Image: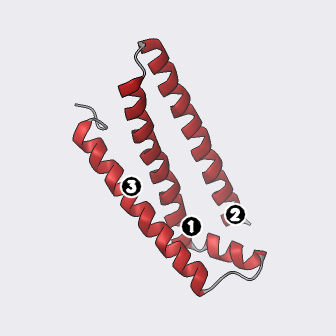
Amino acid sequence: MSLLSGQRAWLLQRVTAIYAGLYVFLAIAVLLARPPADHGAWVALVTHPVVWLATVAFILLMLLHAWIGLRDVIIDYVRPVSVRLTALVAVAVAFLLLGFWALWILIEAALT
């Protein structure tokens, strides 16, 4: 049994969705309570260690959440094995690139 099969994948997707909901709710609450006035305030907010780590976790968990969902759809509905494998590899590569790009942006922001 693989790590992302059946019940484990279902549970992982629910946990990532709960984190996403909490993150979005708290982000909106923080932005409504103390909206950043200028670019410097935005940078200070995003590079605060707690916010930065929460955002990194959010990005990684959303990529995992999307991977589980798309993987299930591709496995269930794409019949030719070669096309299925190609689609899975394409999605995995795209998500890896998006993840590295997002992390690069956050690391650059933290280092400035």
Tell which tag, 2 or 3, sits nearer the viewer. Answer: 3
Rendering coords of residue 17 (x, y %): 39, 57
Q: Residue at x 65, y 58 (%)?
A: 107
Mark closer to the chain start, 1 or 3: 3
The quadrant the C terminus occupies is bottom right
Q: Which residue is mark 3?
A: 16
Q: Is residue 57 above or below residue 7?
A: below
Residues at marks 1 and 3, CA–CA distance in whole angstroms: 18 Å
Judged by depth in the image, the label closer to the viewer, 1 or 3, is 3
Q: Disc 2 and disc 3: Cα gap in Å? A: 25 Å
> The disc labelled 3 sits on which kind of residue?
Thr
Q: CA distance from mark 1 to mark 2?
A: 9 Å
Residue at the (51%, 65%) spot, across then down? 53
Quadrant in which residue 33 is drawn: bottom right
Q: Pointers 1 and 2 in contact (CB under 8 A)?
A: yes
Q: Name the residue type under label 1.
A: Trp
Mark seen at residue 109: 2
Q: Which residue is mark 1?
A: 52
